[in-house]
Image (cartoon, helix red, strand yellow):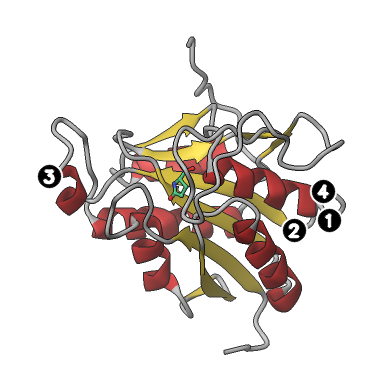
Amino acid sequence: MKSDLPRVLLTGFDPFGGETVNPSWEAVRRLDQQTVRGHQVVALQLPTCFGQSLRALRTALARYTPVLVICVGQAGGRSRVSLERVAINIDDARIADNAGKQPVDKPVIRGAPAAYFSTLPIKAQLRALQAAGLPAEISQTAGTFVCNHVFYGLMHALRDTPQVRGGFVHIPFLPEQAVAHAGAPSLGLDVIVASLALIVDTALALRRDVRVAAGATH
Ligand code: PCA
């Protein structure tokens, strides 16, 4: 499993909230062991559980010593691949996680900063996706459930190693999931996999982000 190539760690989650699949795991597992710009991709599934997910992520960071980490999660209801800008130090669960835990207004990490920014070149990634005809957006919130929890814990873990970049990407439902959610948008797995491959490629190609407006008024 280990090669001499520098590694990229991609994570996805197990199904939660009554779903039988999670597109984040379905997508990242398709990139497992692929080589992108001289880097080996390692895909890891995290449990959709507060605490446990972060422990699994920290173990993988120590085991694989990746140079780039992109965590991916399902955001049912979103229509585009969402490049997350910021992780916040709060757990506030609207539903129980897969272990039955439902923290309300608890810090992810006590005493740690209020927020961390993604260290991915999200604007360049947005541009690359748009140029390839793949629907994408910058998102100003990763929510307050397990995805934000993992994103925050990742950025906290990487805080003293700026050469290791990290961030989070939310993806829509797959079409087969959207069937059960009237009106919910979806993206096919091939589109999601192609988007993630381009997101990895762009991060490895660029050290610095580009400056293009992609903010929101609300
Ligand atoms: N999405 C959830 C957690 C796991 C996942 O895939 C979230 O957005 O928090």
Residue that mark 4 sits on: 159
Q: Is 63 located above or below residue 10 in the figure? A: below
Residue that mark 3 sits on: 179
- 10 Å neighbourhood of mark 1: few (<14), some, or many (≥20)? few
Q: Is the C-beta separation of discs 1 and 2 under 8 Å?
A: yes
Mark 3 residue type = Val
Q: Secondary structure at mark 4?
A: loop
The part of the image, by quadrant, that contains residue 181 is: top left
* Drawn side of residue 185 relative to residue 205, left or right: left
Q: Secondary structure at mark 2?
A: loop
In this rendering, the label closer to the viewer, 3 or 2: 3
Residue 32: % across, % down = 46, 75
Residue that mark 2 sits on: 164
* Drawn side of residue 174 relative to residue 210, left or right: left
- What is the tally of numbered marks visible in this picture? 4
Mark 2 residue type = Val
Q: Is mark 2 within 8 Å of ligand 1?
A: no
